[in-house]
Image (cartoon, coloured by chain):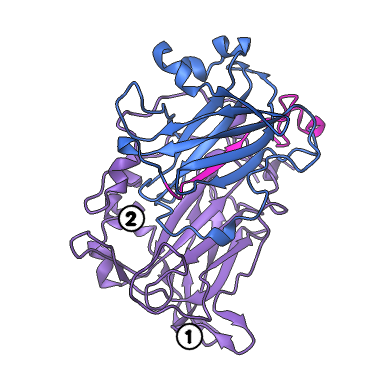
Chain colours: A blue, B purple
Amino acid sequence: MALTPTPWHTIGPFFPRSFFREGDNDLTRGTALGQRVLIRGRVLEQGGGPCVNAVLEAWQADAAGRFGHALDPCAEAADPGFLGWGRAWTDAEGQYAFHTVMPGGYVDPAGPRAPHVNLTVLGSGIMGRLVTTIFFPGQAANAADPVLCSLPPALRARLVAAPDGIENGIPAFRFDLLLHGPPEAETPFFED
Amino acid sequence: MASDAPPDRFDPLPPDAQPRVPIGGYPNTLRRNPSQPAFRRPLTRTELTGPPDLGPRLQPGDSDLARLAPGRIALGQLIHVGGRVVDEDGRPVRGAVVELWQANAAGRYLNPLDQRDAPLDPDFIGSGRTRTDAEGRYAFFTIKPGAYPVPNSGRWWRPPHIHISVLGPSCLSRLVTQMYFPGDPLNAHDRLLNSVADPAARDSLVARQVPPAEVAGDWLGFTHDLVLRGRRATPVLP
């Protein structure tokens, strides 16, 4: 007989700024292997206005597609310079940014996973959490990714970040989120 | 090591035991929640895992919110809040990061976004972070927060509550919740608490008061256990 998980609630409007330190939005530990990338974008609410004070949490594999976690058979080979997790919050314009490395793909029993970043969105009024996945443009592996392919074909491009130039020598990608809107414009989210 | 193995089975959250949105008087529950149902995805390694050691990144700060410094004690009823963090199998979750934040005794947050005309307490910051011990236990000293009215909501008052965020062994075991106080008359009217349909699940959000005779110090004690999502696909017998 399993226990029932404690119900979720919103973070509300007053998640403490003091919980954030400089560098919390950097998924590396400073010395990660791989190609550094910048992921940035805006979180928008119904009507297209900025979703201020959203908290975003990112989790991804290292550059070789490994996780330093007991459920990864390759955990011991995971890059010790890479944490894989970061947290960011949106400013008055709804903007966020993560500093990371291009994740590697890996082979999973469910299928070959393309390079991707798992994203959690928390915010005032979001009573659970919203979960989605960021994919990268120009990756041949996107076509067979079992998570991306669980979306209707017309929506898959919505989870692929857009090239967004070079920032201080680092390739940048843009991933905007619309939390509530017309079905064709709203960001697809996954069951938690 | 088997008993320390992280959960690898994550069943869907039971909908009746989770909040329903939108919530009247809280427009952000409409503006910021999707109009479309969430898509079902396979759970692969990336979804089942999570950062195993967030300690260096989210450093435990002070778990004593009531005493800012020697001689500087927050206004309000001193309380101790503690409990166990377990998974759905009831196994303790060790080393989980537990973050807590709350309003002061007058119902005001030390946050630039809270501009309500209620006093700030110079001796109360109202946020802290700790980690669970080997038995999955966490604890904070703090003060009982005050109730406050929600602006433009038609006289809806939030009952005294404490925000709790837990980062456990998997991204799927993430939990952000709120803890309520037993016996508060505002609980029955709170639109967030009552957005959870299942009475037992709702009740699990309300702390239990420790009988005062069992509390050694000059504070009231509350226990509040938290159940993170996740089981083990193949249970290991002790």
| A171 sits left or right of A42 in the view | right
Question: What residue would you read off at disc 1?
Answer: B213
Question: Magenta-highlighted stretch: main secondary structure?
Answer: loop
* Mark 2 secondary-structure assignment: helix
Does the rendering let one see residue B235?
no
**Do the residues at discs 2 and 1 belong to one chain?**
yes
Q: What stretch is highlighted in magenta?
A: A52-78
In the image, what residue type sits under mark 1?
A: Ala
Badge 1: few (under 14), some or many (20 or more) residues near its Cα, within 10 Å?
few
Residue A61 has which mark?
none
Residue in view at x 31 percent, y 70 percent: B148
How far across and down, in percent of the image, does residue B233 sit? 57, 33
Disc 2 marks which residue? B202
Which residue occupies the foreground of this view, A85 or B114? B114
Q: At which x and y percent is residue B44?
A: 58, 25
Q: In this view, does B92 lie to the left or right of B88?
A: right
Q: Which comes before the other along the chain, label 2 or label 1?
A: 2
Q: Residues within 10 Å of mark 2 (few under 14, many from 20)?
A: many
Q: Relative to the observer, which residue lies in front, B106 or B178? A: B106
Q: Marks 1 and 2: in contact by CB < 8 Å?
A: no
| Residue A26 lies in the magenta-colored region | no
Q: Which of marks 2 and 1 is in front?
A: 2
Expressed as whole percent of the image width and height from the top left, the position of residue B238 reads 65, 46
Placement of A66 over or under B204, stated as above or below:
above
Where is residue A18? Give x, y as percent.
Answer: 57, 61
Q: Does the magenta stretch include residue A75?
A: yes
